[in-house]
Amino acid sequence: MSTDELVQSYKNKTPVIPHAERMEIVKSITFVDEVVAQTNRDKVAAMEKHQFDVMFVGSDWKGNVLFTETERIFNENGVEVVYFPYTSNTSSTLLTEVLTKIAQPN
């Protein structure tokens, strides 16, 4: 799971839910074996280090030039890539704006 610093580095945004809380949310899912802090975006290095056999990623990455090579290497190593459907009607930017307005004092 991407650290707040990593998200900030490539999205130029700080996540609304802090990293530690996101880790706890995912850890609480019955089928999750382990949650690892992601400090860089190198998925192949993560696969080599953690020896996972499934990686979950948003469907907005499917067919992305940056991800195609990673997926090919995963396939060669028996790692399944599961794409979560992109939620086009849910905007994290919009949610952040709404939450910011709610948190502002009158």
Image (cartoon, rainbow, N blue to C red):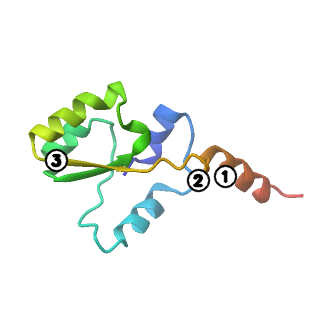
Distance from disc 2 to disc 1, alpha carbons, whole Å, reads 9 Å
Distance from disc 3 to disc 1, alpha carbons, whole Å, reads 33 Å
| Image point (66%, 52%), residue name | 95
Query: Toward the viewer: 38 or 98?
Result: 98
- Give, as a three-letter code, the residue at label 3: Val
Using the image, determine if residue 65 lies above or below residue 101.
above
| Image point (25%, 39%), residue name | 43
Lower position in the chain sequence, tag 2 or tag 1:
2
x, y percent for residue 35: 30, 60
Mark whose residue sits in front, 3 or 2: 3
Q: Please state if 91 lies on the left or on the right of 84 as rendered.
A: right
| Image point (53%, 50%), residue name | 87
- Give, as a three-letter code, the residue at label 1: Leu
Which residue bears the numbered disc 1? 95
Confirm or deny contact between disc 2 and disc 1 (CB under 8 A). yes
Crowding at mark 3 (Cα within 10 Å: few <14, some 14-19, many 20+): some
Lower position in the chain sequence, tag 3 or tag 2:
2
x, y percent for residue 13: 57, 39
Lower position in the chain sequence, tag 3 or tag 1:
3
